[in-house]
Amino acid sequence: MPATKARQVRHNKAVQVLGRIGMGCYGLVYLLIGYLAARIAFGGGGQEADGRGAVAEVGSTPVGGVLLWVLAAGLVAYGLWQALLAAVGYTWIDKQGHRAVKRVTSGVRCAVGISLGVYAARLAAGAGEQGSGDQKQQELTARLLGLPAGPFLVIVAAVIVLGVAVASVVNGVRRNFVRDLDLSSLPSGTQRWVERLGRIGYIARGLVFGVIAVLLGYAAVSHDPSRSGGLDAALRTLADQPFGTVLLSVVAVGVASFGAYCIGAARAQRG
């Protein structure tokens, strides 16, 4: 799609509305991940605490079939909106380097949103689950370790994830995410809460991604792909630490805060 046409589509009102609804669906996924993490902290069973687990949790409700189709549509809409932002978005950011990083981030969100949307649609259609997020992470790590210089490649991946973790924490501490919001579009009473939820949420996400990076690094050093894992493995690793219940409970609140931030900030998100 030519850049001029992509910009026109990005500014289309219907596209903006669908994208913001999709951002709310994306936030719902993180709210459910926080809930599932809290269940792990207090010894409860149930779904894995990751995006797929959150989608499956929606499907387990009495009206799960309908909700899954709605969630699928919302997540795909969010992914496509992020694709437009990745292509021609963030024009309000002056520095080209910062804008490029933002566009790459939107590209990743596009992939995550569409992937979860397709997964939700498959569950709604009765196709069944196809492995957990941790299993897919371990399979990918195993393939990388099987390549020449495989451990080095996994270490590189771990460093990249660690960079994402640090960036998320910095984003929360310095409130950089506010640049992508038009807070004036929100009711005055909610602006401060959206900002607070964003700070807590980005810091919590950074901590979890940091654990994922450590797990990847350990898998590379030990040449054991089973040591790696995604979001669920990272949260369970926190639970296994001293005072793990308290630590994971705090992180669960933080992850849920990020979900609440996405829902609250959807209306204010610059498109």
Image (cartoon, helix red, strand yellow):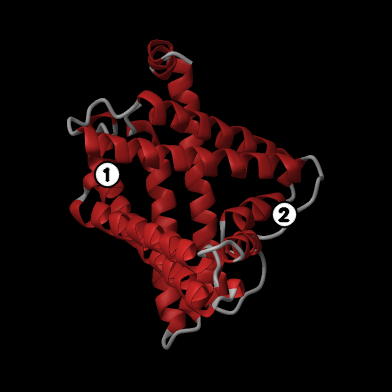
Between tags 2 and 1, which lies in front?
1
Residue ID for mark 1: 177
- Residue 91 visible? The answer is yes
**Mark 2: which secondary structure?**
loop
- Look at 42% across and 88% down and name the residue there: 242
Q: Residue 268, located in which quarter of the rendered image?
A: top left
Question: Is residue 210 left or right of 80 when viewed as pictured?
Answer: left
The amino acid beneath tag 2 is Ser
Are the residues tagged 2 and 1 within 8 Å (C-beta)?
A: no
Residue 139 % position (x, y): 65, 62
- How many marks overall? 2
Q: Tell me the CA gap for discs 2 and 1.
A: 33 Å
* Residue 145 at x, y percent in the picture: 57, 66
One can see residue 188 in this view: no
In the rendered image, the vertical position of residue 23 relative to residue 10, given as above or below: below
Q: Amino acid at mark 1?
A: Phe
Tell me, for residue 18, which label it has, or none: none
Tell me which residue sits at (54%, 50%) in the image.
29
In the rendering, at what x and y percent does residue 271 appear?
35, 26
> Pointer 2: what residue?
60
